[in-house]
Amino acid sequence: MHIRPAKIDDLPQILSIYETARRFMRQSGNPTQWGTAYPPQEMLENDIVAQHLYVGVDENDRPRMVFFFHIGVDPTYLHIENGQWPNDRPYGVIHRIATDGTVHGGLTAAKDFCAQFIDEIRMDTHNNNLVMQKALAKNGFLRCGTIYLKNGDPRIAYQWSENKANGTCAGKEN
């Protein structure tokens, strides 16, 4: 799978991917993380313009996966409870990762892509998103504690480090 920045022309397929992901989340016991309309189209359009939204495309350049990636401080990660970040090094964040269900290993592909640009990556997920928690552990992300979204909702916080010597979260790995 080739990963490239998303374009406005990709928006219909991106919206379809997120609908498929929301349906999968509901079916796998996680109905509230993204509800019925997250992420909103305006947010996606803004992310495309800011060049923070990426798509994984097939051989016909058709988006099959989508995710947000940005290098820099994420305000929701400034405070962490029930644990700690393994280090204070610069990091990138991956948010809102989803596939259309026809590809597997989307998180691995996204992590490997992002690791070309920075060697520390943070993510978070809902307590009910057991599928993502398993994928994060499989990809070497450490469970670090709890962060809170802008609206106050808690999320499990994770960090991946290219160099595992860069620290541990709360003294243990997944």
Image (cartoon, rainbow, N blue to C red):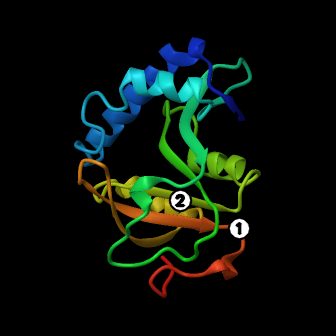
Residue 151 percent across, percent down from the top left? 24, 47
- Residue type (three-letter) at the residue carrying disc 1: Glu
Q: Which residue occupies 44% across, 73% down?
A: 144
Residue 12 percent across, percent down from the top left? 48, 14
Q: Is residue 109 above or below residue 80?
A: above
- Residue type (three-letter) at the residue carrying disc 2: Arg
Q: Is residue 132 above or below residue 36?
A: below
Q: Which mark is residue 122?
A: 2
Quadrant in which residue 102 is drawn = top right
Residue 69 percent across, percent down from the top left? 58, 43
Q: Which residue is mark 1?
A: 162
Residue 159 percent across, percent down from the top left? 54, 66
- Residue 63: in sight, yes or no? yes
- Side of 29 where 3 appears, left or right: right
Quick one: SS at disc 2?
strand
Query: Pointer 2: residues within 10 angstroms few (<14), some, or many (20+)?
Result: many
- Side of 21 where 115 appears, left or right: right
Q: CA distance from mark 1 to mark 2?
A: 12 Å
Q: Which mark is residue 112?
A: none
- Side of 19 where 9 appears, left or right: right
Quadrant in which residue 50 is drawn = top right
Q: Which residue occupies 68% across, 82% down?
A: 165
Quick one: SS at disc 1?
loop
